[in-house]
Amino acid sequence: MEGKEVINMLDGARLGVIGDADMVIDVHTGEIQSIILPRKNTFISMWADRQHIIIPWQCIKKIGNEIVIVELDNTVPNLTRYPG
């Protein structure tokens, strides 16, 4: 999945690239629980707390050759502070 761009199907937002992401994996089952994408760096964010987009695996709708389509709306806590 490395190098695939992650796109939110609800608003068309480009969320990041899988190559820059971490994954949370259940050590007992080996299943992927979520993908953690770092927020895009901006000049101002260099001094702010690191924030990441946490995408639960059940929000991934389609994995294509070049992109991953996810469905994140305001009911999914998709922007969370995560110690990195």
Image (tube, grey):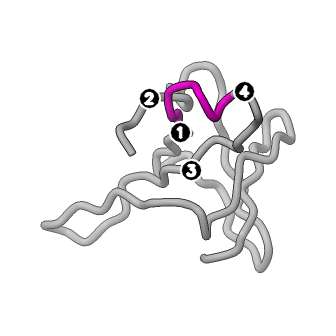
Give residue 12's quadrant in the image: top right
Which of disc 3 and disc 1 is earlier in sequence? Answer: 3
Q: Are marks 1 and 4 in contact (CB under 8 Å)?
A: no
Marks 1 and 3 sit apart, C-alpha to C-alpha, by 6 Å
Give residue 73's quadrant in the image: top right
Give residue 68's quadrant in the image: bottom right
Q: Are marks 1 and 3 in contact (CB under 8 Å)?
A: yes
Q: Which residue is mark 1?
A: 52
For badge 1, the amino acid type reads: His
Relative side of 73 to 13, left or right? left
Q: Which residues are magenta?
A: 45-53
| Circle number at residue 84 | none
Q: Which residue is mark 3?
A: 37
Which of disc 3 and disc 4 is earlier in sequence? Answer: 3
Of residues 57 and 46, the one nearer the viewer is 46
Q: Residue furthest left?
A: 28
Q: Residues within 10 Å of mark 2 (few under 14, many from 20)?
A: few
Which of disc 2 and disc 1 is earlier in sequence? Answer: 1
For badge 3, the amino acid type reads: Leu
SS at badge 1: strand
Relative side of 35 to 68, left or right? left
SS at badge 4: helix
